[in-house]
Structure formats: structure tokens, C-alpha cells
Amino acid sequence: MILRCSPLLLILLCGRSQAGITIFEDTFGHIVNPETQSIDVVRRFTLTNHLLRTQVQIINYGATITSVVTPDCYDKLDDIVLGFDYLEGYRHPENPYMGATIGRVANRISNGTFTVDGVEYRVEKNDRGLNAIHGGERGFDKVLWIPLVTKSDSVTMTYTSVDGESGFPGTVHATVTFTLTLDNRLIIKYNATTDKKTPINLTNHAYFNLAGHRSGSRELVNHVVKLFSESYTEVDSLSLPTGEIRPVNGTPYDLRLPKYMGFALQETQWKGFDHNYVLDGNVSTMAAWVVHPKSGRVLNLYTDQPGVQFYTGGNIRPIYGKQYALYDQFGAFCLETQKYPDALHHDNFPSILLSPGETYEHTAIYEFGLIQLWKK
């Protein structure tokens, strides 16, 4: 159960729905524009829920979530998202997409090739030289977005990806809006349009550890996870979908009932999770639930997408992050809302092709709260 203030209490304390949320803007760093060679400023936006003492920070480099600070059941604040104190960390080649907006196509494209209307396209093979992953070497995570604040509780970022960028067809105008609500929901809304048929599949790659970003695998194993999914897309040894949709029943990937992550990882023989789970695509129903009993923090996920990639950080190489924390294998988890991976090669998967005149729309809601704990 999540503890929330009643609507009446919110009105009494805040006066109006936006009064409890503020946005502060400052400078996070500087970057050289590769086209003009000018120096661009990287902006940071701090969204604060003063009522529930939650703070979310986002930078316009990669439209990246850099921090989510929330209290635990004992009123101790901690940052539950992995990241870096400085821009250089996000630009480091070993950065595993921490907190970034991913595009044009999240996840993998086998062999880095696909065909649209009879034309074959080749995109950058940045996954061990075999496949494309997360949009290529110059994905949406590695570009500077244009930020705009029009409301007191949200920031919108836009990016125009030109025809041929990373090998993809069409000029795409993408928009991501981050909103923090009074009931502690971080709502991410994605939109995109194109002037030529092209694949679009966006997501966010935030790494969560509800015990605190420094807690590592020693506390990740103490998280409890539940996924509201009956099936998953089967993958091969290279994490590419085979095209088969398999029931989770009788497999190590069955998370329909709450399960400690440590036990779940053990069932995979410590190979971990990096799997797309099939969802009903109804944003009003819960897709995933994760709790860290010791701190009492809970994360609920809602989305209108047909899938969510549950990833437990098995490929994280040792890297120093915020406050000199050493991030390592199985130190965090991701819940990446999406259409199915490698959908361009499987006709039975939901299409990720966007045509001129259409609008790509995608909503993901990360709800932060507390469970009730018995205290001595």
C-alpha cells in the first residue's frame, strides 16, 4: 500500500494543484557543438515536490534523468537513481545509458539492417559489431535536446533527428515531457513525427536501486519484484528475439507473484534478466511493482506500451558514479517501457514503423511511494 495525502489535505496545504511543485534551472556543464564548433550549455532542471519531499533532476544532454531523491519510511532522503555528478560521466564510453532517453530505436536491431518499402537500410552496429542497439553511436542519448518550461510541474525537451542520422530514414521531430505530480508520479510522455516512413521506439534507461544508488548488489537482491505479465519474448544467446512469445509459467522469468530479486537471479543461474515482458498496454493498470522492504520505498510502473524490458544490470562494468560510488554488475534494475525488440524482423510483433502524418505517442508513469512497515 502506498501512503498518500488526501486531495483535501493537498488543497489545504498547497492551495492549487501546481503550488507544491517547483522547477529550478541551472548549468550542469558545457559541450562542443559538433556541427558549429560553438560551446553549448547543458542545462539541469530540478523538479521538487515540496509536500512529499521528492526531487527529480533532468539534464538536456540525452534528455537524461540524473537523480531521483525520495524519503524512506524513516524520513531519510536518498538518491535512488544511478548516475554521475558531472557531464563527463554521461559522455564516458563506458556509460551504460544511465537515465537517458533512448532512440530512434530502443533495444536491438539484428545485424543492423532493416527494410522499409523495399529499401534496405544499414545502421550503426554498436552492439559488439554484430547488431545495432539503442539508436547507434549517435543515439538520442548522446545529443543536446532543446528544453522548454511552460508549466510549474513539467519540462519539455525536443530534438530533431535529420534524415540519414545513424543510418535511419526520414527527419524525425521528437518530444519528451517530464512531469512530477503532487502524488509523486514521474510521468514521461514521448511524441514523434516524421517526413518519411521510419522506425521509432523510444524509452528511458534509468537505473533504480530503491535502497539508494550507492547500495549495489548487496541491496538489490533484497528488493521484491512483481511483473504483471503472462509472457515474454524469447531471446537467443545474443539477446535477440527469436520471434517466439513464450509463457512465463514454469520458467525462471515468472515474476507474476512477488519474488525477492536475489532468489530470482539465482533461478537464472546469475545470468540475470534482460527480457521484454508482454503487457496489456493499458496505462491505467499496473505493469510492474518493486519494493525494498528495509527502506519501505516502492516503485509502481504504468504504461500504454505493449512491453517492458526488465534489466538487472548484468552487463554493467565497474564504473564510478555519483559521490564516488562504484557501480557494478547487478547494482540496479531498469524498467524500460517499449514496443518489442527487433520488431523490424518479426511480423508477429507490434509494428514500430511511423509514417508521415502519424504521431508516435507513448506514456510511462513511475510512481514513487512508501509501504507501511511494522516498527518496533
Image (spheres, rainbow, N blue to C red):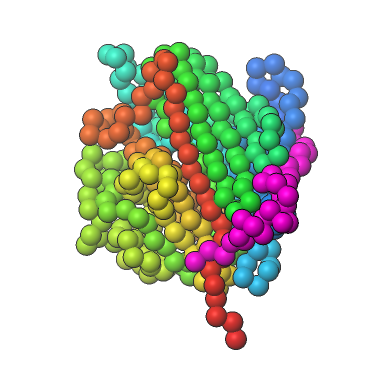
Looking at the image, is 321 positioned above or below residue 36?
below
Q: Residue at x 68, y 53 (%)?
A: 11
Q: Choose between 291 and 281: the one closer to the eye.
A: 281
Looking at the image, is 358 positioned above or below residue 281?
above
Does residue 219 show up? no
The C terminus, quarter of image = bottom right
Q: Residue at x 51, y 33 (%)?
A: 190
Q: Position of residue 111 (x, y in %)?
A: 33, 30
Q: Residue at x 35, y 55 (%)?
A: 228
Q: Residue at x 68, y 68 (%)?
A: 76
Q: How many numbered circles does the render carry?
A: 0
Does residue 253 show up? yes
Q: Position of residue 302 (x, y in %)?
A: 45, 48
Residue lying at the far bottom of the rendered structure: 376
Give the residues in magenta: 1-30
> Could you tell whether 369 is left or right of 300 in the image?
right
Q: Position of residue 374 (x, y in %)?
A: 55, 80
